[in-house]
Amino acid sequence: MGIFKSKEERRIARDMEIKKGIQRIRRQIKELGKSEEEWLEKARQAARIKANDQLAFVRKSLKATTFQRRMLERQLLTIEAAYQMKNQAESFATFAESMGVVSKSINEVYKTTDLEATQKNFEHAMMQAETMSQRMDLFLDMSKDSLFETDSVAGEQLVTDDEIDQMIGVSTEERKKLTREELDREIARELGEDVEKDEVK
């Protein structure tokens, strides 16, 4: 093999890298899904035994894991869609190139002005298709890093606290109530009151 790769060899190498990237993302999504189930089970256990401090910690971990999985699913969809567009652009480029050759052959036989115009049209279409393919390649290359940048605001919209509560099986109102009860006990301790004795009385 020579030092310099042909255009077709470079295209094949890019396609292999894209497919490897897609497979890596799918594996990450699968691993996050497993981790999400483990965090969910821990959250349900903490809710059953009323371990509120542990529940708050596990909820944050569950929410972060769910957010990561959903972001990866969106990124995977974006890459797969862009890859499909790239393949379609390349198919059109092949078609346009073939038709350009056909048009040129016909023009050489008949030497007509209309067929010369047809040839130019096909060549122009071929150039457009190749330009689109190049732009798609550039887009995929640029997306390797940018697609994995996350935003905390987007994260809040993607995974809400209410949704996490539903997954665990604890209502939002119940969680707020538990928090208020904890606050009441804390205030009572600061005032030197014995809440448990008051409740017994």
Image (cartoon, rainbow, N blue to C red):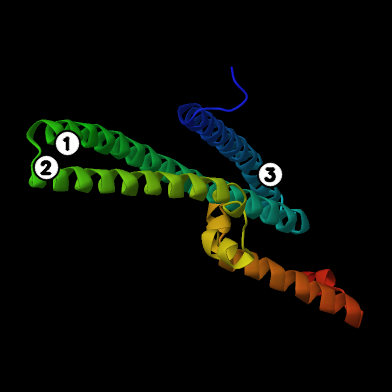
Whether residue 45 can be seen here: yes
The secondary element bearing badge 1 is classed as helix
The first of marks 1 and 2 along the sequence is: 1
The first of marks 2 and 3 along the sequence is: 3
Q: Residue 105, image x and y in percent?
A: 17, 30
Q: Report if the CB atoms under discs 1 and 2 are less than 8 Å apart.
A: yes
Quarter occupied by residue 17: top right
The residues bearing labels 1 and 2 have C-alpha atoms spaced at a distance of 7 Å
Residue at the disc numbered 2 = 115
Badge 3 density bin: few <14, some 14–19, many ≥20, Cα 10 Å: some
Q: Which mark is residue 42?
A: 3
Q: Amino acid at mark 2?
A: Leu
Numbered-mark total: 3
The secondary element bearing badge 3 is classed as helix
Question: Which quarter shows the C terminus?
Answer: bottom right
Task: Determine whether 158 is above or below 23 in the image.
Answer: below
Name the residue rendered at 57%, 68% in the picture.
Answer: 173
Which of 17/101 is in front?
101
Q: Amino acid at mark 1?
A: Ser
Q: Residue 4, image x and y in percent?
A: 59, 28
Task: Determine whether 35 is above or below 158 in the image.
Answer: above
Badge 1 density bin: few <14, some 14–19, many ≥20, Cα 10 Å: many
